[in-house]
Image (cartoon, grey):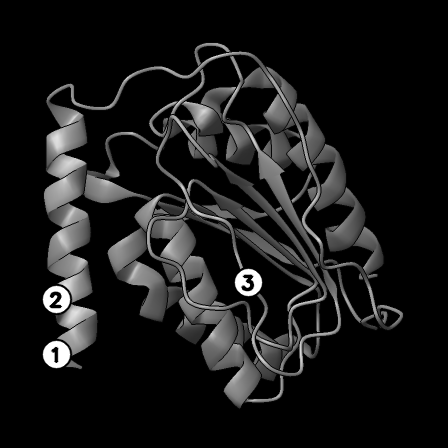
Amino acid sequence: MLLRFSRSISTVSALLACWIGVLQPVGAASLSDGSRQPAAPLIAVAGQQGEVYLLRGFADVFSRGLDQIAGSLSADGIKAHVVSHVQWRMVLRDILDDRQRLGPRPIVLVGHSLGANAAIQVAEELRKRGISVQYLVTLAATEPDPVPSNVMRVDNFYFRTNGWGEPLVPAAGFSGSLRNLDFSNADGVGHFNIDKQPGIQRRLLSNIEHYVRSGY
């Protein structure tokens, strides 16, 4: 508990430093997949169309690209909920309540910055309850835990250099697809605006709609 508290203090301090201008923009674009590829087929979820939960980062200030994504999803008839990263327990409770009322449905989690860390926490709590997550998206995660074994597909957008956002690693038993997509060389893309990039948003919207509607 003390270690997690110390890490959280360190993360918030770094965020404050970046907020006042320490973080600099990054350079030319590049995409690279992580080394972890699917080791087992994904399993479809029967039931109704799923919902999407998007978790903002520090102070709810820098993650407004998630609101744009949610707006596009809503326009396409997909329920999307945007909340602060500190409300991750509420997200967990809502998912469990909906599951009890409506049965199993696809679960999609998206997080930016501290919200990315929180999305992984939600996934871990669902793992403890034997519930799968169809799709997890993390944008510039700060000090993320390993991806739990109940997640089927993960797309992590990070910066190997010249930015702030870490690659993800799988937890024991993980057999899904984990892609670490490096944006270190993407011109003008940094920690605080990666969620607002039109190209990334288009990719995420396509993937999210697929997993929410098909479940696999």
The Cα–Cα distance between marks 1 and 2, rounded to whole angstroms, is 6 Å
Q: Quadrant of residue 107?
A: bottom right
Q: Which residue is at a point 31% across and 50% down the rendered structure image?
A: 114
Comparing 96 with 123, the one in front is 123
Number of numbered discs: 3
Q: Amino acid at mark 1?
A: Leu
| Mark 3 or mark 2: whose residue is earlier in sequence | 2
Residue bearing the label numbered 2: 6
Residue 79 in view in this figure: yes
Q: Position of residue 52 (x, y in %)?
A: 57, 52
Instruction: Check the image and report above or below for 21 versus 60.
Output: above
Task: Specify few, some or many for label 3: CA neighbours under 10 Å numbering under 14, 14-19, or 20 or more.
Answer: some
Circles 1 and 2, Cβ within 8 Å, touching? The answer is: yes
- Tell me the element at label 3: loop
- Tell me the element at label 2: helix
- Seen as rendered, the residue at the extreme bottom is 129
Q: Quick check: 86 left or right of 68?
A: left
Mark identifier at residue 169? 3
